[in-house]
Image: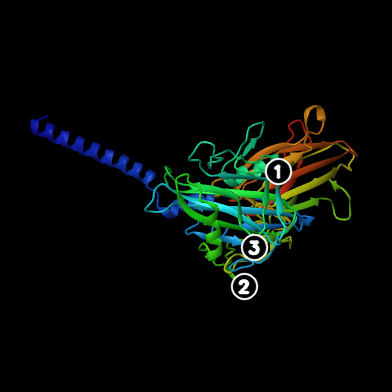
Amino acid sequence: MTPLHRHLHRLQAMAALTVTALSVTTASMATVFVSPQLAADQQKAADQTLTRQSQVRALSGELDDVLMVNDNNPELITGEGILVSTFPQAPGLNIALNGRFDLFSHHVYAGQPDQLDSTLWLAVVAEPAGDAPVTLQLLGGSTSLSQATLKGQTASPFLPLPALMAESGTVIASGPGSRVAGDLLRGDIASELKQEWHIAPGSVSPLVVLPIPVAGLDPLLNGRNLQLRLQSTGPVHVATLAAYGSGDKVPGPDKWRTLLSQGRQSPKEHQPTPRGARGRIIYSRVSGIQIGSTWRATLTDPGSSHLNIEDVPVSWPISSLERAELQTGQIQTAELKAFDAGTAWAAHGNYGVEYDLTLPLRNQGSQQRTVAITLESPDKNKSGKSQLAFSSRHSGPVMFRGPIEVSGLDGAQGRPSGRRRFHLVLRRGQEGPLLGQITLAPGEQRLVRVRLVYPADATPPQVLSLLPVKQSTGASVDRQ
């Protein structure tokens, strides 16, 4: 082969290698750079809807008539002033609270651009409605920040917890709403709260003054949840107020009295869709006084004093609301006795409401039967009274983040267990992780009790479900 031929051969070989390399690179690029439409189609194919046949029944029972001061509008506080007031002077709602009443407050604060160490102070103030002194007793309650900035502050960061964690002597929480709900179930009271207040007539007295600090946080964002269960010896007016401060310097009583007397509201947010209007609904947030703080119920079959274990799943909505009642016709939302203009006209979501449910189970069959119990977050748009829809992937937004307590599950040596608490993190369309099982011999009965405080930051509704468990050597839940 002549030198010229050898040179041409090398050029041809190099060209072939270049073409091969380009082909491999192009193929690799085709693998990596997928068109947005193709990616969406692939995601859609992977994210399948799972449908489970189920009896979806309206939840029996009802809310009690205990009044609750509901302070959640604005959620993001952007200015000093009155958050919600029951005082007679404007912009108060002119309602005196007497005997048993509750308070729910949930807010976030994003700081001030010109002050990196600013603190927003939240106060609950009260004054007797008459000429006699009043004593307020704390029956239960707690408070929590999202993030603590000083030692001793009760706080609960939004931790990426698994779907199910069993509580065994250690507080498990993710976010302040989750923490406070768990404290209420356990009967724990945050160290920031007093047990009793004596209020003299004729003067506004601060009951609770709590910071929402952002100093040192990145981003500048913090939140606080507060719930109080109170008993008063006489009628009182109550208000929640917000004031700016710096560091840990607590505003004095005169600051709160001045804010209340000025009558200036902290700016509201989210104008609600009028009640009964068609089309897209904006629920808004609550700034008012709701009727009801606890939903008690005994769940039985229609016309029976028991709930018979069957071979079909049974579910009950929890916190069903307008346009999200799973075709049960039941809206559990607490009505409002009074509310501030431009805020929600009902307590959509029932935040802070306790659900106390009893299930008197009975096995009327001739063979041993087992059911599992779970709290689930079905797709509300695809679910109805005869079926529940779930997603095959658990990648959607978190819809429920909080604790649940169950009594009467199968325990050691076949005996019913006492109270067991679990922390759940449920995403949109997620079948609930099993909390436990109940096994009954023919004719056997057992009372099962379920308690939860509907936590702030949850998105309703959820369902409480009883699922039949196949009786076999490898017993499994029958998710039909």
Q: CA distance from mark 2 to mark 3?
A: 28 Å
| Residue in the picture at 49% in, 39% down | 150
Q: CA distance from mark 1 to mark 2?
A: 35 Å
How is colour applied across the structure in the image? rainbow
Q: Which residue is mark 2?
A: 277
The image position of residue 187, as x and y in percent, is 70, 40
Reading the chain from its start, which is encountered first: label 3 or label 1? 3
Instruction: Work out whether residue 199 or residue 173 is closer to the camera in this orientation and state it.
Output: 199
Identity, as a three-letter code, of the amino acid under mark 2: Ala
Element on which disc 2 rests? loop
Q: Along the horizontal axis of the image, is 456 left or right of 26? A: right
The image position of residue 74, as x and y in percent, is 54, 59
Element on which disc 1 rests? strand
Identity, as a three-letter code, of the amino acid under mark 1: Thr
Q: Indicate the quadrant where residue 186 lies.
A: top right
Q: Residues within 10 Å of mark 3 (few under 14, many from 20)?
A: many
Q: Which residue is mark 1?
A: 374
Instruction: Work out whether residue 189 or residue 360 is closer to the camera in this orientation and state it.
Output: 189
Q: Which residue is mark 3?
A: 86
Mark 1 or mark 2: which is in front?
Answer: 2
The image position of residue 92, as x and y in percent, is 61, 66
Reading the chain from its start, which is encountered first: label 1 or label 2? 2
Reading the chain from its start, which is encountered first: label 2 or label 3? 3
Instruction: Work out whether residue 437 or residue 185 is closer to the camera in this orientation and state it.
Output: 185
